[in-house]
Amino acid sequence: MSSVTAQETTFNLDTLNAGKVPVMNLRTVDAIKSEASVALKGVPFPTTRDEEWKFTNIKPIARGAFVQGNLQSLKAVSYDTATVPEAKDSTLVFVNGLYNSDSSNVKDLPEGVIVTNFKDAVEKHSALVEVSFNKANNFEDDYFTLLNTAQFEDGAFIYIPKDTKFERPIHLVYITKGQENTASFPRNLIVAERHSEFTVVEEYIGDDDAAYLTTSFTEILLGESSHMSHVRLQKDGLKAYHINRLVSQLQRDADLQSYTVSLGAEIFRNDVRAVMQGEGSHATLDGLVLVNNNQLSDTHSIMDHQVPNCTSHQLHKTIVDGKSTSVFNGKIFVRKDAQKTDAFQENHNLQLSRDGMVYTKPQLEIFADDVKCSHGATVGQLDDEQEFYLKSRGLDDKSTKEILTFGFATEVIESLPVNSIKEDLRKAVEVYTTRGLSN
Amino acid sequence: MSEIDALDSVVSQPYKYGFKTEIEYDDFPRGLNEDIIKMISEKKGEPDFMLEFRLKAYRNWLKMTEPTWPNVEYPKIDYQDLVYYSAPKKKPKLDSLDEVDPAILETYEKLGIPLHEQKMMQNVAVDAVFDSVSVATTFRKKLAEVGVIFCSISEALKDYPELVKKYIGTVIPPGDNYFAALNSAVFTDGSFCYIPKGVKCPMELSTYFRINNEESGQFERTLIVAEEGASVSYLEGCTAPMFSKNQLHAAVVELVALDNAEIKYSTVQNWYSGDKNGVGGIYNFVTKRGICKGVNSKISWTQVETGSAITWKYPSVILQGDNSIGEFYSVAVTNDKMQADTGTKMIHLGKNTRSTIISKGISAGESNNSYRGLVKIGKKADGARNYSVCDSMLIGDQCGAHTFPYIESANSTASIEHEASTSKIGEDQIFYLQSRGLDEEDAVSLIINGFVKEVFKELPMEFAVEATKLLSIKLEGSVG
């Protein structure tokens, strides 16, 4: 469907890193990077004429002359790892896409566990990187995946060996600071061997005053019977552009619980995919999106049931206020032989303002007969009866709305695995609801 | 016998209406150009505005490209290899059945719809379209008494040109989409129905369409107008003879409901779907749309799609008048190599508009069945309400079921609910029924009837019987 792209809507690749592809000094990785760089030239910049981008106009991104972050900006930033006390000794900090060793703090890891930055992993654990890098990537001809693959300079590398339970959450912090038009391309690789159990929190933070671009990519390989909890917090500045891809590959009996909470960014596009390759695996991809003013948040997800006896669950909630827009496209694929699949997807949208837009498209593509697949989607307002009840108990209009909106949002937050983050998000939702209702 | 085998035998019943009547045809040469369109218009003695309408549509069509977004695959159609006009040579008079070509009457008899019997027993007016020209119309007098106009569109163009001019192309403009534009340029006949102010149509109106001339595309055009406070229930049913070459059927149906008017449009579609290997069969690319123009108006689509090699249609409702109601009830059955991409569009523009979508898809064999729907709430549609359910059932592991619902809401007072599910016939359900003494086939049939019941109960009485029969024909087969 993609037709010829007009000149003005192409992304200026030349200003990035002076048109060069950053080198990792590892043969297989660099080969993939340069391949991506070549492929990128043949892929048009997505426009609203593409079905996958129908409601998400990313022209503003194309206009920017972005440049990659530099090392100088690292010095100016510090991060207190005690912000999330559970993870104070297992935190990696990245600034403008580059690793900040001064702020990071990783110690007392169990034997065999690796929590480090990608560059370091390439040096010290090259064999591990080589066998797993780009293995789960199933984004074909996707502009931003190719862009990330070609341009990334660093990111996180996590390896959990077999039969290892890592109790502390691993906290990855990505900060964008500094001048306008900073571009960063964090690339994360997470590998878990069989019977492992761990938690990863990705958190993206940025300033409100600069328009910057984050193009991130997280790849997760889960071995047999491994359990992973994954939280992704997008708290970017309100002028930021953030495009993320997350792909996970699950082997037999693996279990992934992934939660994405999106609060910031002017334009946020999030593609999450779970590929169930081993029987008995389970994936949860939950999401909470809060948008206001001119924000646009777009989530595309794919639950790919490739083998029999897998289960998946998805709860995606959005609250739309101001002139903001929310887009959701959730696909459930059940491949030909994936019998006994049980897949469930729910999407609820709360529309608070007259000028907000909600687009939702839950999608089922089923090629096996002995399956249980369902989805539900709703768009609505606060429940009249609930409002009436609260008001009859003496609450005023404002606090009634606050309580109900908060209640709508907390369903997702309550299932998050890290307490301090839950607490932090509850506050963020409170700020959002009061802010939203005052304008 | 395993359950799958039973299901297989049950759903792979050969096409019962495969025969062809030998009568002479009065055909145009193959191909399409402005001259052909002028010839069609001239042949039918149409007023000038109609020719202009056709030519405008044709010029639009030339600029358009065939859509590729539906989830269906078919070889490219050579539009210059089609015959755009064919009519039975002896054009019979309309007041007596005796004057109709006996071969045609025989065809209807084979189909089980003898006109004279139906006339007496069913109290249904039948405007039978044989290929492109109407050959018999009944009950016209009875309808005329209350002021209802029910005739073929070519007659309407002669007798009521002003009415046709006022409404044709207002719901589906000549440049609406590729197939609608083609239809607007070359349509040869169809039905016209006009219910004047305050009239409740005294009987249900129905038309039977048949394609009978090999390789002639059929382009039906239906226009139904219900004036203020009027109401009508319209039934359309299709069966077609067996051919090996694909046939294109690109119909256009337009419905207009003014203040407090109500239109109910029901379809049972059973075109020839091709053989087991997907050879032959009808391409059913239809544009159906209704507009609830007035306040408190209502349009209801009910469809039972069991035939065609490819079905591609989205009966839609534009809910313009405040408090208007749109409904869509659909059962789509695909088997062998059939492909169906069907659903609806509910466009809410007026305040307090409501819509309901109930879609049931059954796929068997190697078929693919897609539901594609749009619910769009405009900025001014305060209090709009939509409820959608689309359920799919898969029989066998070679088929596919797809759901593509688009929901777009631009109004914060709107409330939209959508749910979809995909499942198979429950083993425990079959087991239970068998334990109560039913054989496997009856059990399956009973369960499927239960699955589609929600839609079938919306069909008018006569059709409900026919549809249930049709489904059991499709599901008929031997067990053990």
Image: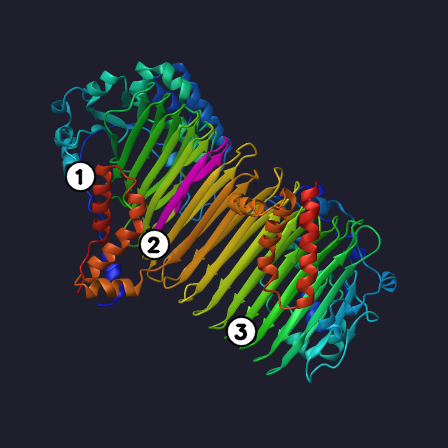
Mark earlier in primary sequence (1, 2):
1
Residue underneath mark 3: A254
Residue underneath mark 1: B111
Q: Secondary structure at mark 2?
A: strand
Count residues near mark 3 (Cα–Cα under 10 Å), then give few for <14, some for 14-19, many for 20+: many
Q: From mark 3 to mark 2, how far is it between C-alphas?
A: 32 Å
Residue underneath mark 2: B363
Whether residue B469 is visible, yes or no, is yes
Q: Secondary structure at mark 1?
A: helix
Answer yes or no: are tags 1 and 2 on the same subunit: yes
Foreground pick, A69 / B200: B200
Q: Is residue B65 left or right of residue B148?
A: right
Q: Which residues are magenta?
A: B341-363
The quarter of the image holding the C terminus of chain A is: top right
Q: Amino acid at mark 1?
A: Leu
Point out residue A180 in the picture as x, y percentages from the top left corner.
Answer: 82, 50
Chain letter belonging to callout 2: B
